C-alpha cells in the first residue's frame, strides 16, 4: 500500500489532531508569556514566560471547543459563503464560462502549457500583492480555466491555491509576516526585499513547472489524474471552444465584477478592510450582477442556495480546523511549546539553528495558523534567541517566513487554505498527495536561501 493510500479522511485527520491537542494539555505544563498591546495586537514580552496552574481540557471541553471554533472562524466561514454566492450568480449569467472560453479560443489550445504558466504567475502575484483570504473567490475561475484546457480540478488547485499560498507566504512585502517582523526587530520596513523577491520568483517558477509536469502526465494518461471522480458541475464549458464569444451582457457583468474587485482592493489598502468588508463586496457584486443579467428573484434565490450547498463542506472544515487553536488556548500550552522550542535552539550552531528555527515555525504554524498572530507570539522570542547563536535579525525573520509561509501549503488548521480547496472542490487528502512533494521541493530551496543568508551575515542586524 502506498503512503497516500493511508491518508485518512480530512474530518478524521483533524479530529485526531484535536484529540492530540487535548492530550497535550495533560502532558505539558501550562504556561504563558506576558503580553503588551502594540498597535492593537498582543505581542509577547521576551523573557516573561512562567508556568501557571495546569488547565487540562476535559472531554466535555474538547467537544465544546467545536462550536467555539466555528464562532472564532465566523468571518472566514462567511467569506466562503459570500464568494460561493458571487461565483454562482456569475456562473448563472454565463459570464465566467464565456470569458474563459473566449480567452482560450483567442490564445489557442496549442498554447495550453503557456496558459498554465501564465495563470500560475497571475495567481501568485495576487498572493504577493493582494493577500490570502482576499483571493478565495478567484479560485473557481482557475477551475473553469483548467477544465477548459483539458485539465482537472487538481490542476486548478495547483494554478490557484498553490500559487496564491506560495506568493503570499514568500511575498517580500507581506505585511503580516515580514512587515510585523521588521517592526518587532526595529528594522527598516521590508528591507532585504531583493533576496526575498528572488526566492519568491524561483518558488513560483517551481509551482508553474510542477503544474505543467502534472498537466502533461494527465493529458498522456487521463486515468492517472488525482482529480478523477471530483464533482465538476457548473465548472465545465458547455460548448466547443470555437463557439465562444462575449455578449454585451457578459461585458456588463464582467465590468461589475472587475469594478467590485477594484473597490475591494482600494478599501483593503486605503482603509484596512478585511473579511467582513470583503464578504460585503462579494455579496454586492453578486446582487448587482444578477440585476444586470436580468435574473428573477427566484433565479437568484435558487442560485444562492445551490452554491451555498456547494461550498458548505469547505466552510465547515474552516470552523472545524479552528477548534485546534481553541483547545490549545484552553490548555495554555501554546506558549509552553514556543518556549521549549526556543530554549532548544540555543544548543545548536548558527546554520543548524536557522534551519531548526524554520522547522519550529512549521510546528507552531499548526497551532497558530495566522501569520500575524504567529509573528507576535514567536518573533519576540526567536529574534533574541537568534542573536544568541549568531543569526542576524533578518535571518531570523526569513526563517520565520519560510516556516510559516511554505508549510501553509498543507496546514489543515489554516482556514483560508481549506476554504480555497472547498471553492475548488478538492478534498484535503487528494490535495496533500499533490502538494506535499511540491512543498518539500520549495522548502529545500528556501532553506538553501536561508543558509546563504546566514553565510553572508545578511543584514541589517
Image (tube, rainbow, N blue to C red):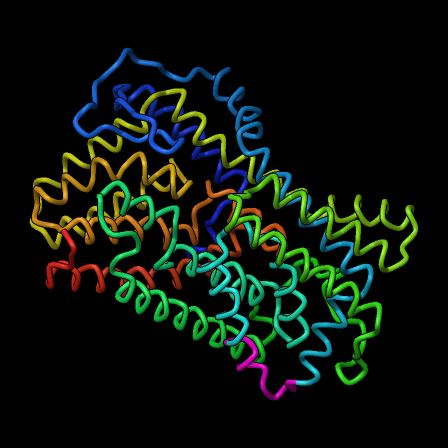
Q: Which residues are magenta?
A: 107-117
Viewer-nearest residue: 22 or 349: 349
Q: Left or right: where does residue 196 sit relative to residue 209?
A: left
Name the magenta segment's main secondary structure: helix
Residue situated furthest front in the rendering: 270
Q: Residue at x 44, y 60 (%)?
A: 128
Say if 29 sits above or below 438 in the image: above
Viewer-nearest residue: 33 or 13: 33
Q: Position of residue 367 (x, y in %)?
A: 38, 35
Q: Position of residue 361 (x, y in %)?
A: 29, 44
Q: Position of residue 230 (x, y in %)?
A: 66, 59
Residue situated furthest top in the rendering: 53
Q: Residue at x 16, y 27 (%)?
A: 47
Quarter of image, res 368: top left
Quarter of image, res 364: top left
Q: Position of residue 342 (x, y in %)?
A: 18, 36
Quadrant of the frame with the N terminus? bottom left
Quarter of image, res 443: bottom left
Does the segment drawn in magenta span residue 180?
A: no
Amino acid at each position: 500500500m502506498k503512503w497516500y493510500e493511508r491518508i485518512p479522511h480530512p474530518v478524521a485527520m483533524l479530529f485526531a489532531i484535536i484529540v492530540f491537542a487535548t492530550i497535550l494539555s495533560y502532558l505539558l505544563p501550562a504556561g504563558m508569556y506576558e503580553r503588551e498591546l502594540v498597535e492593537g495586537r498582543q505581542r509577547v514580552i521576551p523573557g516573561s514566560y512562567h508556568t501557571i496552574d495546569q488547565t487540562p481540557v476535559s472531554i466535555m471541553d474538547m467537544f465544546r471547543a467545536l462550536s467555539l471554533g466555528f464562532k472564532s472562524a465566523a468571518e472566514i466561514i462567511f467569506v466562503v459563503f459570500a464568494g460561493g454566492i458571487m461565483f454562482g450568480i456569475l456562473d448563472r449569467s454565463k459570464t465566467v464560462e464565456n470569458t474563459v472560453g473566449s480567452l482560450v479560443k483567442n490564445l489557442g489550445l496549442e498554447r495550453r502549457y503557456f496558459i498554465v504558466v501564465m495563470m500560475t504567475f497571475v495567481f501568485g502575484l495576487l498572493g504577493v500583492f493582494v493577500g490570502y483570504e482576499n483571493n478565495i473567490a478567484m479560485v473557481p475561475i482557475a477551475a473553469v480555466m483548467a477544465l477548459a484546457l483539458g485539465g482537472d480540478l487538481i490542476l486548478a488547485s495547483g494554478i490557484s491555491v498553490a500559487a496564491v499560498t506560495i506568493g503570499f507566504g514568500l511575498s517580500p512585502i507581506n505585511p503580516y509576516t515580514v512587515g510585523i517582523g521588521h517592526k518587532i526587530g526595529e528594522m527598516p520596513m521590508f528591507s532585504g526585499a531583493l533576496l526575498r523577491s528572488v526566492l519568491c520568483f524561483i518558488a513560483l517558477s517551481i509551482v508553474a513547472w510542477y503544474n505543467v509536469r502534472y498537466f502533461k502526465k494527465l493529458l498522456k494518461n487521463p486515468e492517472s489524474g488525482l482529480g478523477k471522480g471530483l464533482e465538476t458541475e457548473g465548472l465545465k464549458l458547455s460548448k466547443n471552444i470555437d463557439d465562444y464569444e462575449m455578449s454585451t451582457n457578459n461585458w456588463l457583468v464582467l465590468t461589475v465584477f472587475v469594478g467590485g474587485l477594484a473597490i475591494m482592493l482600494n478599501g483593503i489598502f486605503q482603509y484596512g478592510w478585511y473579511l467582513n468588508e470583503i464578504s460585503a463586496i462579494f455579496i454586492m457584486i453578486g446582487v448587482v450582477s444578477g440585476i444586470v443579467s436580468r435574473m428573477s428573484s427566484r433565479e437568484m434565490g435558487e442560485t444562492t442556495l445551490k452554491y451555498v450547498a456547494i461550498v458548505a463542506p469547505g466552510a465547515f472544515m474552516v470552523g472545524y480546523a479552528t477548534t485546534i487553536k481553541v483547545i490549545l488556548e484552553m490548555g495554555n500550552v501554546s506558549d509552553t511549546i514556543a518556549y521549549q522550542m526556543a530554549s532548544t535552539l540555543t544548543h545548536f550552531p548558527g546554520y543548524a539553528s536557522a534551519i531548526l528555527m524554520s522547522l519550529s515555525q512549521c510546528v507552531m504554524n499548526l497551532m497558530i495558523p495566522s501569520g500575524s498572530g504567529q509573528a507576535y507570539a514567536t518573533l519576540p522570542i526567536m529574534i533574541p534567541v537568534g542573536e544568541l547563536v549568531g543569526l542576524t535579525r533578518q535571518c531570523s525573520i526569513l526563517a520565520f517566513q519560510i516556516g510559516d509561509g511554505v508549510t501553509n501549503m498543507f496546514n489543515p488548521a489554516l482556514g483560508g487554505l481549506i476554504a480555497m480547496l472547498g471553492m475548488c472542490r478538492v478534498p484535503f487528502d487528494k490535495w496533500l498527495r499533490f502538494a506535499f512533494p511540491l512543498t518539500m521541493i520549495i522548502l529545500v530551496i528556501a532553506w538553501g536561501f536561508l543558509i546563504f543568508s546566514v553565510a553572508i551575515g545578511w543584514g541589517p542586524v
